[in-house]
Image (cartoon, helix red, strand yellow):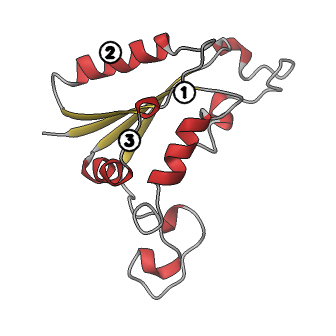
Amino acid sequence: MKHIHLVNGHEYYEFAQGKYNQTLFDVHERVLGKHFKLTKTIINDGYDIAQEQENFKNADLVIFQFPIYWFSAPALFKKYMDEVYAYGVFFGMGSESNNSDKPQKYGFSNGLMNGKRYMLSITTNAPEEAYGDPDGFFEGKDLEEFLFNIH
């Protein structure tokens, strides 16, 4: 059976309680739980770093559900990534990450979880037509350009 790890990256604020984000997360869990083995993490409730790393190692797919705050992930989700995506677990440097004597280029070639699949399920406060409009607020940029740092 395929294993999916669900990560809810919402950070609670009184003015942004995350009800819509939680609803989407619950739908992922309900629908996918019928067909796949699931593990889940709600970052705002806390997490164990070593367990999260194991969840990633064991997952065939990771689905991240979170809102976009100021064109990025919420601060608590960013902290999660900084803590969980550890050197020697998620990435290495140079030839050590691929058992080769040939130095590797910076970036994807040093990943230790290459081949893992993931999906970003995000919410924004902007309508779809706002992206890509050269005369609009986003100056013609599409949503994927704003997500580059998360990818």
Q: Are marks 1 and 2 in contact (CB under 8 Å)?
A: no
Residue that label 2 marks: 27
Q: Where is residue 147 in the image (x, y as percent from the top left)?
A: 62, 37
Whether residue 123 can be seen here: yes
Q: Work out how far the residue at label 1 is from the one at label 3, CA to CA, in angstroms.
A: 13 Å
Q: Which residue lies furthest to the left in this view?
A: 1
- Residue at 64% over, 14% down: 128
Work out whether 136 lies above or below 83. Answer: above
Residue at 65% over, 14% down: 125
**Quick check: 126 above or below 98?**
above
> Given the image, on which type of amino acid does mark 2 rest?
Val
Horizontal side, residue 34 vs residue 56: left or right: left
Q: In which quarter of the image is the N terminus?
A: top left
Q: Element at badge 3? A: loop
Where in the figure is residue 68, as x and y percent of width and height?
A: 62, 26
Question: Quadrant location of residue 43?
Answer: top left
Q: Give the amino acid type for the residue marked by disc 1 in the picture.
A: Glu
Q: Is residue 77 left or right of residue 2?
A: right
- Res. 41 image quadrant: top left
Q: Mark 1 points at which residue?
A: 11
Residue placed farthest to the bottom in the image? Answer: 101
The foreground one among 150 and 114 is 150
Q: Label 2: how many residues lie within 10 Å, few (<14), some (14-19) or many (20+)? A: few
Q: Name the residue under label 3.
A: 47
